[in-house]
Amino acid sequence: MLEQRIQQQFFDSADLHYAAAEVLAKPVNDAVSALIGCITAGGKVLACGNGGSAADAQHFAAARARAARDPIIAPHQHQPGRLEMGERARFGGVAERLRGRRVRR
């Protein structure tokens, strides 16, 4: 009985992966093409997130930097003040504040 449930989980997972591949292959390809186009044109790719997404963004940026042997800017080092700055500025001008610029309103 338990073994059948375990097998069914694998089958359901495989079905879901197959369905996702059919639906998501083109959008993922388009996203990768856009990233490559940006980088090869000399542009920047910015990755950000909050909580677990921030960890994913940091991992993504570090992996790309290692692959390109480029340094990365890690504003996560200033994380304790970010939310406070966002609250003070009502989230307007947070990027400028992270870069050390004062924002006048």
Image (cartoon, rainbow, N blue to C red):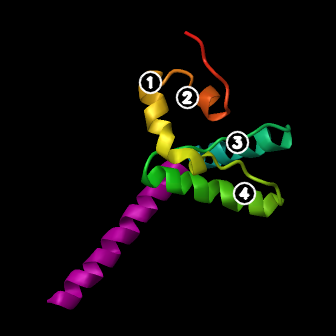
Picture coordinates of residue 7, whole percent (x, y): 28, 83
The residue under label 4 is: 64
Q: Which residue lies furthest to the top in this view?
A: 105
56, 29: nearer the viewer:
56
Circle 1 Cα neighbour tier, 10 Å, few/some/many (<14 / 14–19 / ≥20): few
The residue under label 2 is: 94
The residue under label 3 is: 45
Q: What element carries label 3?
A: loop
The answer to which of marks 2 and 3 sits earlier in the sequence is 3
The answer to which of marks 1 and 4 sits earlier in the sequence is 4
Q: How far apart are marks 2 and 1 (CA)?
A: 9 Å
Q: What residue type is labelled 3?
A: Val
Could you tell me what secondary structure mostly forms the magenta stretch?
helix
Q: Magenta segment: does it hold 3?
A: yes
Disc 1 or disc 4, which is closer to the eye? 1
Magenta stretch bounds: 1-25
Disc 2 or disc 4, which is closer to the eye? 2
